């Protein structure tokens, strides 16, 4: 039977969840909650019950799961209200605005035995899953470096909203957090990191650009460059096509045919989202003067957000454990906040021994 889902927060990402819940036979959209009149009108025009107060929705509707898609600072109180009622939650990223608050949420979910999935949607992307499997199968040998680019130009109107010009509203907390989660998904836990940031181009209080150096427990090293002011196609959003999905079209032809991620090991390297795979394995005496073999790995084309909601339905039915647990969300948040601290202090930050 389809899981009965409610959405709290019908903004940009809430509407993406709306679309995929309605597309999937595994989920039924029961109701939404959002205080803004435009969101209420949007839902009522589609004959979906809409509430200005999410508590009223939780009281009146029978729900198996709720999508928490409100601003970051509201994730914890909204999530706790669902957990108290035993309702499974998909909490958008970041899991919370503060690590301590995120721990409270995770503890409550554990105590009440309520399933909690964090919305780091990229982990549901088929190309990302293919590359992770390739790394796990040893196709690149021992992981050595991860090179990540998130360089794109956000339009001037994006910054009309005041909070996007203030500390906390920039690419570290909004965009880099996805890269941190992805790099952890690929190479495992981060031991320590260093970072620099700059607001030189836009001149706002918040950074427009940052660079991060990471050391993993395995001994591998990673770099991430993130900027919202660099005119370039070299970012996951422009290269993967997911951004188009986010804004309601599924025109995959709009994606830029470049790589934004390179994962290199002792025996080969793979790229995302292009899935190029380079290796020496079949050549005697591998080395830089030899030709590299080049192949393209294959991943089925699929809507990442649809895959995420269908996974959530299986998590609700307790058929699968959450692919992104509360603890995963906490670790990714902690590392992302450490980037801000490292950039502000100039110190390396140890995340774990
Ligand atoms: N995974 C992704 O791809 C992705 C993309 C964008 C945003 N996000 C995350 O989703 C969350 C929302 O971001 P957004 O860009 O959709 O923001 P948004 O501002 O477009 O939408 C937020 C919505 O929440 C509503 N809201 C605020 N307080 C509420 C409350 N107490 N009860 C009910 N509704 C309330 C607002 O009215 C608004 O409609 C953020 O945590 C963000 O980081 C995730």
Image: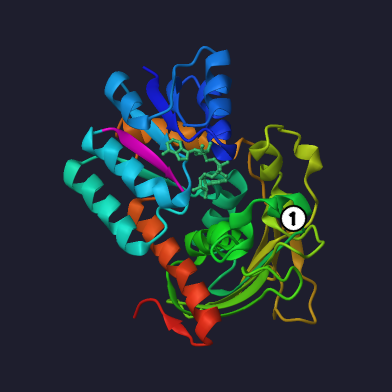
**Residue 241 sits inside the magenta stretch:** no
Q: How is the image coloured?
A: rainbow
Q: Is residue 79 left or right of residue 285?
A: left
Q: What residue do we see at 74% from left, 68% from top?
A: 202
Quadrant containing the C terminus is: bottom left
Whether the magenta-drawn stretch holds residue 90 is answered as yes
- Relative depth, front residue between 267 and 49: 49
Question: Magenta segment, principal secondary structure?
Answer: strand
Q: Quadrant of the N terminus?
A: top left
Residue 342 in the image, given as x and y percentages of width and height? 51, 80
Q: Residue at x 27, y 24 (%)?
A: 59
**126 sits to left or right of 1:** right
Is 113 above or below relative to 102? above
The residue where tag 1 is placed is 154
Residue 127, horizontal then vertical, whole percent:
62, 48
Task: Tell me the element at label 1.
Answer: loop
Q: Residue at x 50, y 59 (%)?
A: 181
Asked whether the viewer can see residue 319, the reply is no
Give the extent of the magenta segment. 87-92
Position of residue 270 measured from the top left corner of the image (x, y, whole percent): 66, 62
Q: Nearer the viewer, residue 117 or 166?
A: 166
């Amino acid at each position: 039977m389809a899981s009965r889902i409610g959405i709290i927060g019908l903004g940009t990402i809430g509407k993406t969840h709306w679309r995929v819940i309605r597309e999937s036979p595994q989920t039924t959209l029961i109701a939404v909650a959002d205080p803004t009149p435009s969101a209420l009108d949007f839902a009522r025009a589609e004959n979906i019950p809409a509430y200005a107060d999410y508590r009223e929705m939780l009281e009146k509707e029978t729900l198996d799961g709720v999508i928490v898609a409100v601003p970051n600072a509201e994730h914890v109180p909204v999530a706790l209200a669902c957990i108290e009622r035993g309702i499974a939650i998909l909490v958008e990223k970041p899991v919370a605005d503060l690590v301590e608050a995120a721990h409270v949420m995770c503890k409550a979910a554990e105590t009440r035995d309520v399933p909690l999935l964090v919305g780091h949607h990229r982990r549901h992307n088929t190309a990302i899953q293919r590359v992770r499997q390739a790394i796990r199968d040893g196709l690149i040998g021992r992981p050595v470096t991860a090179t990540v680019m998130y360089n794109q130009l956000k339009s001037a109107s994006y910054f009309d909203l005041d909070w996007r010009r203030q500390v906390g509203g920039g690419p570290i907390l909004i965009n880099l957090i996805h890269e941190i989660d992805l790099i952890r998904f690929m190479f495992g836990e981060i031991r320590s990191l260093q970072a620099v940031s700059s607001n030189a181009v836009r001149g706002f209080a918040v950074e427009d650009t940052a660079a991060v150096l990471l050391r993993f427990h395995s001994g591998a090293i990673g770099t991430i460059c993130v900027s919202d002011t660099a005119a370039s196609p070299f970012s996951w959003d422009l290269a993967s096509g997911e951004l188009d999905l986010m804004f309601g079209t599924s025109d995959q032809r709009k994606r830029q045919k470049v790589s934004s991620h390179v994962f290199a090991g002792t025996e080969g390297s793979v790229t995302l989202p292009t899935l190029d795979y380079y290796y020496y394995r079949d050549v005697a005496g591998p080395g830089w003067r030899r030709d590299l073999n080049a192949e393209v790995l294959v991943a089925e084309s699929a809507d990442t957000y649809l895959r995420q909601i269908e996974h959530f339905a299986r998590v609700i039915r307790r058929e699968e454990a959450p692919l992104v647990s509360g603890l995963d969300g906490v670790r990714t948040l902690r590392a992302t906040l450490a980037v801000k601290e490292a950039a502000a202090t100039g110190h390396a930050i140890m995340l774990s021994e």
